[in-house]
Image (spheres, coloured by chain):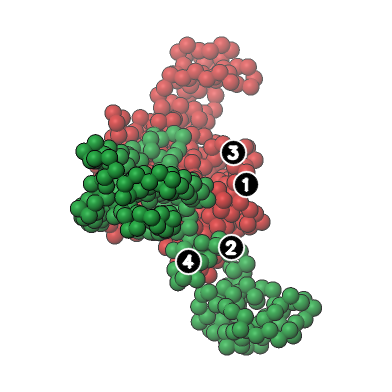
Chain colours: A green, B red
Amino acid sequence: MSDDRHGSDGGTTSGESRMTWHVPEEDIRAYVRGELAAPLLWSADTHLAACGRCRQTLADIGDPVALDAGWERLDAELDAPRPGPVEWLLVRLGVADHTARLLTASPALRRSWLGAICALLVMTVVAADAVRAGATPTLFLALAPLLPLAGVAVSYGPGIDPTYEMSVVSPMHGFRLLMIRTVAVLSVCLGLNGLATLALPAYGLHALAWLLPALALTATGLALSSRLGPVLAPSLVGGGWAGLLLVARMNTEPHTTLAPFTAAGQGVSGAVAVLAAVLLYLARDRFDASGLPFSDFTDRNAA
Amino acid sequence: MIATVTASGLSLRYGGTLALDEVSLRLGEGVTGLLGPNGAGKTTLLRVLATAVPADRGSFSVLGHDPGTTAGRLDVRRALGYLPQTPGFHQDFSAFEFVDYVAILKELTDRTARHREARRVLEAVGLSDVRGKRIKRLSGGMRQRVALAAALVGDPGFLVLDEPTVGLDPEQRMRFRELIAQAGEGRTVLLSTHQTEDVAMLCHRVIVMDAGRIRFEGTPAELTERAAGRVWSSAERDPSARAGWRTGTGAFRNVGDPPAGAHLLEPTLEDGYLLTLDARTEVAA
């Protein structure tokens, strides 16, 4: 809610000396009717908690029943978790507040994890920039697709997500939660990879050859995790990617673009990504209960 | 007893172990205790009933819903409150934020209603005053109460509690028992424990499990009655006893088949439990 919507009349009382704006009467009327939508609603809630003048306006306008409902909302607001910057931004971008909370609770979006990704990317970019050998930054292109794969892998599963067991038995479909977290991790990882790509302008579009392999590896890892679990599946996919690159290296002249980063290789990556996405969708119900060995649960006494 | 939760022939094998072996049971309103030693299959049974893992064979129903179907499983989960044996937390969340998060998982998407519910359950477990505190700064007992509050979100009709009093000091345990007793009013609660005091103080019915099978199902009084005439004291450990342990008086308390002329004692729930397990254990206390 911007200040210009509210004005700065400076007409504050002693108990609200820091108030520089007040909720417009039309918003208070909408608030009373329960029609004021977030984020205007949250601003009004927060402001009403601290501003006697607006509370009085609310009391003058509202009927007692509606006013009680307003107080109840206000009580709830006083306890409301303060959103972090990412959550705040997501809500401002139109993401529902409950979805934003689920997104930002993803274990892979913790600062430590993001810091590790950034450090890794910076080192790789610096190395690629310092040692130019061929038309593509091979080390960067080899590493970048693994980051979203690993990020998604550490977003969901027993032993990784501390609330996994509670999540599994919640009414929210496990596949939906997985997809919410995948979108969160993919967005962040692809964004960071994209920034790293911009730091390698000398390679031109060749530096973007990580994108389709990243989507292919992530989708394949997820599709396999429905059967192999959230640890083994991405490990196998990551290992397979490393093996593929080694084989390609052995069969390619030095300083020549490796097969996965050629146009044909990109086409294969795209096809694999689509196929894996379809398989993942078909296997969605397998994420609705844990088919994993009990030892994978995070308790002390499995049986 | 009007059955609210029923199970028939539940079996589940993992590795080489038969974790559940043809388990059938009926639960009604109130708190039912699930007793058994480590490895008896209690946690496995609770996970199956909570729809966390599917059984290999058998069926069950919760409040009239069949979890064998997708729609039925969803209905069961909507009616379920689950406190796992080792509840995990996002440590940087406050107690309120954590309960709020679980409420989102339980489909409470309306912000105002969700926050109201979070306040209600935190008040119910006596944590209103510390609701803004980070979970990593709470004591073990308080964390356990946060987990119970999360389980109570949405006022579930079926509450599954897996050893909630483990690791709590005696005072916290008493406090938790009060909360469980309150939670058992008007809903079905299945409480896994290996502490017979929990059952004696809280439960109107008790199930004893061992090696994946149900060994007893009835009231605590009926379990105690199993040991009637089979508990005696002696100055030394009686080798014919199935279990014997030294009590605070220095005398041995024995359970099993008493010798002629033995000084019989009033049985307790623990005696009935030990005899039901039919184990030859010796506990020095």
Answer left or right for A289 relative to A110: left
Q: Residue at x 38, y 38 (%)?
A: A296
Q: Residue at x 53, y 74 (%)?
A: A39
Residue with the mark numbered 1: B138
Amino acid under disc 3:
Leu
Closer to the observer: label 2 or label 1?
2
Amino acid under disc 1:
Leu
Q: Do the dots labelled 3 and 4 sit on one chain?
A: no
The quarter of the picture where residue B10 lies is top left
Residue with the mark numbered 2: A82
Disc 4 chain ID: A
* Residue B219 seen from this side: no
Locate residue B85, reporting x and y percent: 47, 41
Amino acid under disc 2:
Arg
N-term mark: 3 or 1 = 1
Residue with the mark numbered 3: B168
Which element type, helix, strand or loop, lies under badge 1? loop
CA separation, marks 2 and 1?
19 Å
Q: Reply above or below: A106 against B278.
A: below
CA separation, marks 2 and 4?
14 Å
Locate residue A193, reporting x and y percent: 40, 54
Graded by Cα atoms within 10 Å as few (under 14), some (14 to 19) or many (20 or more), the crowding at tag 4 reads some
Residue A90 is marked as 4
Disc 1 chain ID: B
Answer left or right for B111 relative to A275: right
N-term mark: 2 or 4 = 2
